[in-house]
Amino acid sequence: MKIRTPHPTLRARLTLVYGALFLLAGLTLLAVTYLLFNQQLSRSFNSRYGAPGGRPTRLAIVSPNGYMLEGADALRWMQAQEAELREAAVTSLLTQGAVALAVVALAAAALGWVVAGRMLAPLRLVTATARRIAAAPAADRGLHERIALRGPVDEVKELADTFDTMVERLDHSFDGQRRFVANASHELRTPLTLNRALVELAMHRRTASVDVKRLGESLLEINARHERLISGLLLLARADHEIGDRSPVDLADVVAHVVAQTAPEAEQARVTVQEAAFPAPAGGDAMLLERMVHNLVENGIRHNTGDGTGWVRVASRTSPAGEAEVEVSNTGPAVPPYEIPALFKPFHRLGEERMVTGRSAGLGLSIVRSVARAHGGDVTARPREGGGLVVTVTLPRAGA
């Protein structure tokens, strides 16, 4: 496994570059100043104590200890004093220059950090917007976000505008896809209703034979499946939009209502439905939340043992974090763990349910996930030991 080593941020690298360039320029300036200063001292001493022809002038000085020095002795004493003065001046120049250079370099690095931060602020805005879009619970959520960067037209402004244009086109594309699904589903409802009416009319004729009635029952079953499919597509298209107007909903009431609704189907399938409805206040669209729980219970009833020993447990509760939860578990065939993510994809069915004449349209769990995410929540599933699934829906607490 390859371990990634941490790298400094772009702001830190720019600050280091600014500081290094300023330090290099300061060192160059200090070196040039040292050379010029040393050269000027040499010229000054030579011009003061040397004759035009390079021969020393006649000197006579009194040293600090009171001795009289003349000629070569006086010149050597003066040269020694010049060397000490030059060394002291050069040492002072280098020491004070180095201290000043260090202080100014730190100030330049701090100023470079501030300037780099201000220059990279638009890029941070682009990154934050892209992160919010990427963190949306569904691919088409958050596409209404725009950077809308203001300021002069430069490279960063062009990048932000290009990003906004790309997101806008994606948003329009997803909207067009949802409208197409909704419109197509609406348009298909009319011929299916007409087909059902014609088939029922033909079946209920007095002259209808047994074969015609048997054929009519098969056609009605296929027609009913297509109607469920279209209703599921319409509901899925609606659930893909985030819920704006939220009303208080207690999931315990939803669970009790759904269990009562599905009782006939459970009895026909010889499945026992166990209810554990505890208060779980949430907020959202009551009809969509009811459909979400109904799909979970219906899925648990249909995908069960079928031998009279199966059961479905439906529970609602409030988590320690204050979130509303609904958990539906059931007996049934074993589900491989690697198949669970695919169960939430539209039109995905397992085993015999893949057949065209299956009772399920393959949209149940897809609708559950869409409704949960439209309410700001999520859904998870795991295989139950002994067969079946445990599906848990988590929604934000009421008022969140």
Image (tube, rainbow, N blue to C red):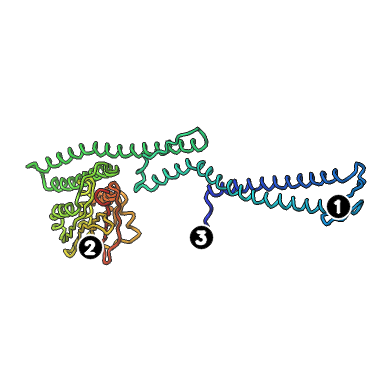
- Residue 331 numbered tag: 2
Q: State the residue at coordinates (50%, 32%).
A: 153
Displayed quadrant of residue 334: bottom left
Q: Mark 3 falls on what kind of element?
A: loop
Could you tell me if the residues under marks 3 and 2 are in contact, i.e. CB atoms within 8 Å? no
Q: Between 331 and 187, which is closer to the camera in this rendering?
A: 331
Which residue type does callout 3 highlight? Ile
Q: Name the residue under label 3.
A: 3
Mark 2 Cα within 10 Å, few/some/many (few <14, many 20+)? many
Earlier sequence position, callout 1 versus callout 2:
1
Foreground label between 1 and 3? 1
Could you tell me if the residues under marks 1 and 3 are in contact, i.e. CB atoms within 8 Å? no
Q: Name the residue under label 1.
A: 62
Which residue type does callout 2 highlight? Thr
Q: How many marks?
A: 3
Earlier sequence position, callout 1 versus callout 3:
3
Q: Between 360 and 131, which is closer to the camera in this rendering?
A: 131
Q: Mark 2 falls on what kind of element?
A: loop
Mark 1 Cα within 10 Å, few/some/many (few <14, many 20+)? few
Q: State the residue at coordinates (82%, 44%).
A: 43
Percent from the top left, x then y, of residue 400? Answer: 27, 49
Percent from the top left, x then y, of residue 90? Answer: 74, 51
Which residue type does callout 1 highlight? Val
Q: State the residue at coordinates (41%, 43%).
A: 129
Q: Between 38 and 395, which is closer to the camera in this rendering?
A: 38
Displayed quadrant of residue 149: top left
